[in-house]
Image (cartoon, rainbow, N blue to C red):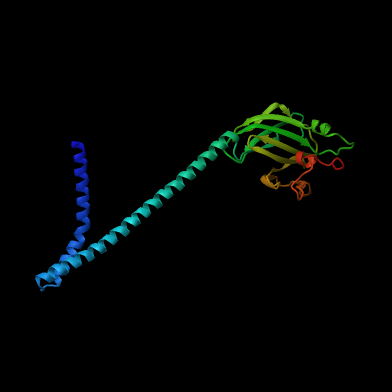
């Protein structure tokens, strides 16, 4: 009971203090106005003071109401701004978690250590994002040679080189002495099909020997859900023959479908 009385007394004191603060302005204004209107009779003093007090009380009350409403709106604006910042932060952190788990926007690029020699190896490095790539595989298709006789799909794919790369770390090259690259002479054209937890992409690797030096042209593309191709990386060394850079990759038809050859990157057997 004593505790309840103390809480009630403190609340009453707060109400009285706030009421006094809000009434002090109309009291002073009413007193000044009544003094200014003097000399008048006692009856006039009471009526003038009462009317002026209620007028200034109404004016003060509206001012306080608008002021409190403004502060409330400012508080809501502040809360809304903090919520937007919090949601943006959650979105960024969620994107980072997904990126750390899958690889984000990272992609791999293949190259050769010593083109034109029998000791050349395939080497892979990562581009695009800060997150490591996981469960990376590559299928390397040599499209330099013309297919003279008709071959089955199995026979064509069996000639490709399949490499299990695994996890790739940003800013570090990945290679293995078992990943032998074929010895090439004068020119080499490869289409390299990558797959990882964050999706799949295609690298076109073109190599030409010019004046005893091997030059490289690289383009990495990713096919989106609408079957359009987005270029992720393009690197053409100076001096690379312009006419030999890249042939346009077949696009999907109006219905969004692709032939099996287009989907898996196989060239027409009647062309080199």
**Residue 136 in the image: x percent, y percent?**
66, 32
Residue drawn where x is 69% and y is 40% of the image: 201
Image coords of residue 268 (percent x, y): 84, 42
Based on the displayed image, in which of its 4 quarters is residue 209 positioned?
top right
Q: Is residue 48 left or right of residue 138?
A: left
159 on left or right of 100: right
Task: Give the residue at the far bottom of this rendering.
Answer: 39
- Residue projecting furthest to the top: 178
Pick the quarter of the image with the N terminus.
Answer: top left
| Residue 115 in sight in this render | no
Image quadrant where residue 43 sits? bottom left
Residue at image point 19% right, 67% down: 51
Q: Is residue 29 above or below residue 191?
A: below
The residue sitting at 30% across, 58% down in the picture is 65
Q: Can residue 242 be seen here?
A: yes
Q: Give the answer, above or below, for where 59 lies relative to 239.
A: below
Q: Residue at x 63, y 37 (%)?
A: 198
Q: Nearer the viewer, residue 212 or 195?
A: 195
Q: Considering the image in quadrants, where does the C terminus appear?
A: top right
Q: Is residue 84 above or below residue 182?
A: below
How far across and down, in percent of the image, does residue 103 sit? 60, 36
- Say which of 149 and 120 sits in front: 149
Horizontal relation, residue 251 to residue 125: left or right: right
- Nearest the eye: 28 or 195: 28
């Amino acid at each position: 009971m004593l505790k309840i009385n103390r809480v009630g007394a403190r609340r009453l004191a707060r109400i009285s203090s706030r009421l006094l603060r809000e009434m002090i302005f109309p009291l002073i204004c009413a007193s000044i106005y009544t003094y200014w209107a003097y000399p008048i009779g006692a009856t006039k003093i009471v009526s003038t003071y009462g009317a002026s007090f209620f007028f200034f009380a109404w004016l003060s009350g509206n001012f306080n109401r608008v002021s409190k409403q403004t502060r409330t709106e400012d508080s809501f604006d502040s809360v809304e701004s903090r919520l937007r910042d919090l949601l943006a932060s959650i979105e960024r952190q969620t994107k980072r978690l997904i990126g750390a788990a899958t690889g984000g926007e990272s992609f791999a690029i293949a190259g050769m250590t010593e083109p034109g020699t029998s000791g050349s190896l395939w080497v892979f490095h990562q581009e695009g994002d800060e997150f490591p790539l996981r469960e990376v595989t590559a299928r390397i298709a040599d499209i330099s040679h013309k297919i003279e006789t008709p071959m089955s799909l199995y026979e064509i794919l069996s000639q490709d080189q399949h490499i299990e790369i695994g996890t790739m770390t940003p800013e570090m090259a990945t290679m293995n002495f078992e990943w032998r690259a074929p010895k090439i002479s004068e020119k080499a054209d490869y289409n390299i099909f990558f797959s990882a937890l964050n999706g799949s992409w295609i690298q076109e690797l073109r190599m030409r020997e010019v004046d005893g030096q091997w030059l490289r042209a690289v383009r990495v593309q990713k096919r989106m859900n609408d079957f359009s191709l987005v270029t992720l990386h393009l690197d053409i060394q100076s001096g690379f023959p312009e006419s030999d850079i890249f042939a346009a990759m077949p696009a999907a038809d109006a219905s969004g479908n692709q032939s099996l050859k287009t989907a898996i990157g196989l060239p027409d057997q009647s062309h080199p």
